[in-house]
């Protein structure tokens, strides 16, 4: 689907639910996509991209950032502690702050480097055992802990369970953000970004609807 179809759909949904036009940021999720598709979207003028693996992003984005000005890179996948420093150098925004140990590692490295990406806390809204994220009951304490560490927490992120209506999870995330004085919400993917916008998403993470299906072999 052309990029303009997605931006049109975002604008329509913003208008339908009375959101400020342009208040939803579109993160084009380029993981696993062939380079020519990513370059095509850059050539259309889009600059905000998401990747879920540090290693994969490190393999393609330094070159692309040289070729295209103003790229903004978002890490949307789990971050292993041993890749924290590398990720903090490569990404402008990290959406997957999901545990106290990682918060402490980021704070320590931010002190050393004098620089820290913006951070979203990932919340496991479905309380799924196999999924990353802070449990809803632990969130308020974790936000305080991150603030005490001086971390630039800007919002919350979630990935709803695949077999449930995402709207309930988006609404829960919005409620938790509000309660904690956080303004940004990273929620909504190809199949549900309009429903996320209706619940207040400020960042939607859209991959296959822009680039086509991912081919993992
Ligand atoms: C891959 C991925 C997306 C994009 O998924 P699509 O269904 O292709 O839009 C969004 N968020 C996260 C965390 C992802 O890993």
Image (spheres, rainbow, N blue to C red):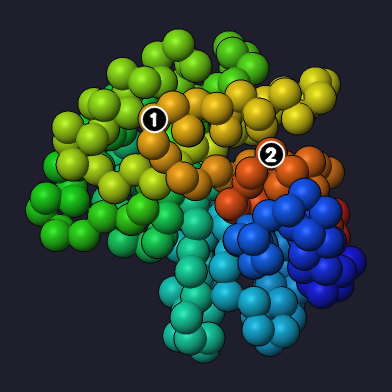
Q: Is residue 190 above or below residue 33?
A: above
Crowding around mark 2 (Cα neighbors within 10 Å: few <14, some 14 to 19, many 20+) is: many
List x then y, in percent, for residue 132.
52, 25
Judge left or right: residue 209 versus residue 18.
Answer: right
Left or right, residue 162 beside residue 96 = right
Quadrant position of the N terminus in the picture: bottom right
Residue in the image at 47% along x and 33% along y: 178
Residue to which mark 2 is pinned = 199
Q: Is residue 54 visible?
A: no
Mark 1 residue element: loop
Q: Earlier in the sequence, mark 1 or mark 2?
A: 1
Depth check: 213 or 24 in front? 24
Badge 1 residue CB within 8 Å of ligand 1: no
Instruction: Say which residue label 1 marks.
Output: 180
Residue located at (74% from left, 43% from top): 198
Which residue is rendered at x = 26% and y = 33% of the image? 146
């Amino acid at each position: 689907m052309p990029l303009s179809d997605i931006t049109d759909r975002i604008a329509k949904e913003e208008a339908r639910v009375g959101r400020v036009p342009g208040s939803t940021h579109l993160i084009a999720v380029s993981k696993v996509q062939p380079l020519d598709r990513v370059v095509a979207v850059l050539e259309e003028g889009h600059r905000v991209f998401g990747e879920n693996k540090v290693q994969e992003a490190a393999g393609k984005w330094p070159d692309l950032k040289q070729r295209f000005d103003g790229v903004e890179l978002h890490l949307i996948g789990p971050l292993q502690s041993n890749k924290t420093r590398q990720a903090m150098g490569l990404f402008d925004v990290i959406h997957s702050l999901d545990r106290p140990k990682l918060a402490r590692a980021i704070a320590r490295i931010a002190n050393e480097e004098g620089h820290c990406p913006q951070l979203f806390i990932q919340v496991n809204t479905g309380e799924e055992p196999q999924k990353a994220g802070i449990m809803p009951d632990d969130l308020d304490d974790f936000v305080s802990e991150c603030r005490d560490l001086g971390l630039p927490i800007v919002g919350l992120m979630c990935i709803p369970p695949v077999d449930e209506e995402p709207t309930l999870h988006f609404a829960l995330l919005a409620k938790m953000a509000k309660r904690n004085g956080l303004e940004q919400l990273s929620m909504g993917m190809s199949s549900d970004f309009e429903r996320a916008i209706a619940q207040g998403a400020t960042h939607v993470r859209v991959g296959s609807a822009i680039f086509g299906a991912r081919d993992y072999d």
